[in-house]
Structure formats: structure tokens, C-alpha cells
Amino acid sequence: MAGYVVEPGGRIAWNLHVPGDKSVSHRALMLGAIASGVTRITGLLEGEDCLATLRAVARLGVRVQRPAPLEVLIEGVGLHGLAAPAEALDMGNAGTAMRLFMGLLAAQRFDTELVGDASLMRRPMERVAQPLRDMGARIETRDGRPPVRISGGMALQGIRYAMPVASAQVKSALLLAGLYAHGETTVVDAAATRDHTERMLQGFGVDVTARDGVVTVRPPGRLEASQVEVPGDFSSAAFFIVAACIAARDPVVIESVGVNPTRTGLLEMLALMGADLRLVNHRSAGAEPIADVEVRPSRLRGIRVPERLVALAIDEFPAFFIAAACAEGETVVTGAEELRVKESDRIAVMARGLEAVGVRHEVLPDGLRIEGGPVGGGVVDSHGDHRVAMSFAVASLRATAPIEIRDVANVATSFPGFAPLARSAGLRLEEIP
Ligand code: S3P
């Protein structure tokens, strides 16, 4: 099983550019598929998760051309033009792909089955299946988990749904199903979550309104093909933002990063810890704001993380826990039980990793309490979780001995090229078979 060995003493430097945003890439591929006309996507994340979506789109009868690296042309087949796939659609490790496809496929004329890798086959799907059933869909899960079997030919009815969990995936699945429903579909957020679907639907000409956590979509006659420029993924930039806080000598700039305010809770959390961060060179990539993130080396202090920031930083907690381990004093995260149902149980798996490198901590049902202090060396099992693997690579910058990280192949799901980029930035990282 592939791993990393990361020697201590690296120093983070340079201007960096991270790959495209995973959430935006998935959505662009799906909306392009059901639009009328050719959608051009540039800066696509060519990680395994988005490639699973790309393959699924092709298996649903959509022609996809790849004229250049990171560029895709999708010949949209229109809202009702998707065709039955010959076999089950394999979503790999991608929870976003599976949940958003559930919404999109619930209203088709044909049946589909969605499967994934061992991690995805353990993840909860009823949170999407149940409200889709309320809309009239027929969907089966196995004890709440994949495989997901969707029956075609069902007429959907728009609903108003108050989400019990803060989840952009649930919201997005319902909005996609709502494109096909009779009447409007309204989703009420439990807390603000990423709004890429709402923004992108508007870019494809759909009537979507979003205000005060209430999103309503009205079924369009068609989606107009669009151009999507995918911003750099804030969640990938996060590893280098934390790295720069804890181990830079000079300012580090991460260029052209998506800074949609529903994604950047980490910046606020680090600022509360005393980090010296700023966003410069603001511009936009279509419907999404982008900027360069400038980070200066900082002395971090432990904090109690405001719960309102949890959903706005949901994918950044593995990296944030490393920042907390390198801070002075105690950091407490609560209200983050959703971390337990990500690619791994990120509370348990991060806690085991912190244990392995000698960081004192306490596991809470819905978070972690971490005592900042020295980070040692050790062997960390990422349990196949890409973000856990990359976080412990960053921890090496402050470690007193090498950290070996096991089971890192899934880094390719979200951050192809992480290892060479990390090395060029100054991490002393070696890949081992
Ligand atoms: C995502 C939403 C989040 C996030 C995931 C991507 C999306 O999941 O953790 O990595 O693209 O909508 P939840 O909706 O389950 O919180």
C-alpha cells in the first residue's frame, strides 16, 4: 500500500498553484451533460473523484471531448436526453458524485444503480434518498448505504424540505431533482453550506433564488450550455495555508484560489488563532470569487472554534487539527459530528494519527480537544482518507522525527500532483510503494 515518508525540517516557500475545485468540477460536468449545447470547462480537477463523474456522464450517453489538459467539452444532451447506462455507475471514492447523481437520476426514464469503493459503500445515503422519496422518487439503499438503486419513470413533485443536517450534497441533490419536478423545490439549510450548485445553475440560465438559507429552484424548460472556469480548490490550498502558518520563513502566496465565503471558514479560524493571512488580487471565475491567499509565518494560539464556522470549513478540519497541534495552548472543536461520516471517521482517524505522533488530545463525540505542543515522529494510518494523509505530511514541518503515512493512494482523488508540489514547496516528502 502506497505511503509517504516525510522528514522533519522542511520549510515552506514559493508561490503555489493548486488544482481545480472538486465541488465545482463535479457540478460543471453534471450540468453540462443536461444542458442544451456545448459546455466548455477549463481548469477541471482531473482527480479520481471527478474522473468518476466524467466517466459516469459518458456512460449516460453524453459525448465528452478533452481537447487539452484540464479542459473538457461536453456535448449536452438536454434535460431529457440522458440514456440508460449498460451497467452500474461506479463513483469510486466520491460521495459528492454519488449523492448529486441520486438527485439527477431520480427523475430519468431509466433505472440506474450506483456503487463505489469500500469507503463509499459504508457512507450514509438515506439523507438524500428520503427527501427524494418525498418528491416521488423510488430509491433503494442497502441498510442506508450503497448500492443505491434508482427506478426510472417516476414523476417528481416539488417539495419544501428543511434539512436536518448541514449538507451541501443533500441540498444539491434536491435542487437537481427539482429541475425535473412539477412545481418549485425549496431547501432550507440547517446552516450555511457551500452554494456552488445555486451559483452554477444560475449560470446555466435556471431560475434559482437563494436568501437567508432558503433556496428555491423552479423547473426550467432547458439549461443553456455555459463556460465554466474552475477556480483553484480552497480545500487543497488549505494544506499549504496551514503549512505556511507553521513553517514558512517568508510570505507564501497561493494563487487563484476559490474564496467563495461558504468555503473559507478555515481562514477565520486561523485568524482567530493569530495567523497573518490576507486575500489579495480579488477577481472572479464566472460565478465564483477567486483571490490569491497570502500567508505569513505566524505564532498560533489555541482557540475554541465557533460552531457557526464548522460547516464553512467542513473539509478543512484534518489540516486545522494539525494547526491546533502546533499552536500554543488548547483548541476545542465541537458541533462537528459530520466529520464522522466523511471519507473516514475523521475524528477517530485524526485522533489515532495525533496519538501516533505524540500530540495530546481528547476525543469528543462531536469533535476534538487538542493540546498544542511538540509533534513527534511515528507511523500514521490514513485509512485511505486523502485529507488525513496530506494533513500529516504538513505536520512533518514541525515534527522532531520522520512521519510515515500509510495508505495514501486516495490523495489522487482530490489532489493529483500533491507529492511533487509539496516537495517543490519545501516538504521533505518521499513516496514509498
Ligand atoms: C461537498 C459537500 C460536503 C463536503 C464534500 C463536498 C459538495 O459534504 O464535505 O467534500 O461538493 O457538495 P456534505 O454535504 O456531506 O457536508
Image (cartoon, rainbow, N blue to C red):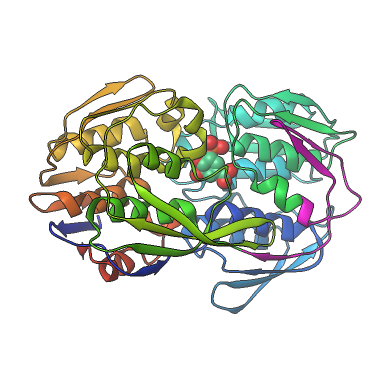
- The image quadrant that residue 424 belongs to is bottom left
Image x and y of residue 75, in percent: 76, 69
91 versus 150 height, above or below: below
Q: Residue at x 53, y 25 (%)?
A: 143
Image x and y of residue 217, in percent: 81, 39
Quadrant location of ligand 1? top right
Q: Residue at x 37, y 42 (%)?
A: 270
Image x and y of residue 55, in percent: 59, 61
Q: Residue at x 46, y 29 (%)?
A: 338
Q: Does the magenta portion include 206?
A: yes
- Relative to 152, 425 lies left or right: left
Q: Does the magenta portion include 272?
A: no
- Residue 335 visible in image: yes
Q: Residue at x 67, y 25 (%)?
A: 130
Camera-side residue: 355 or 303? 303
7 versus 134 height, above or below: below
Furthest residue toward top: 365
Camera-side residue: 399 or 3? 399
Image x and y of residue 323, in percent: 28, 42
How many marks overall? 0
- Relative to 60, 345 lies left or right: left
- Relative to 75, 432 lies left or right: left
In the image, the segment drawn in magenta is 202-229
- Relative to 264, 376 lies left or right: left
223 versus 173 height, above or below: below
Furthest residue toward bottom: 67
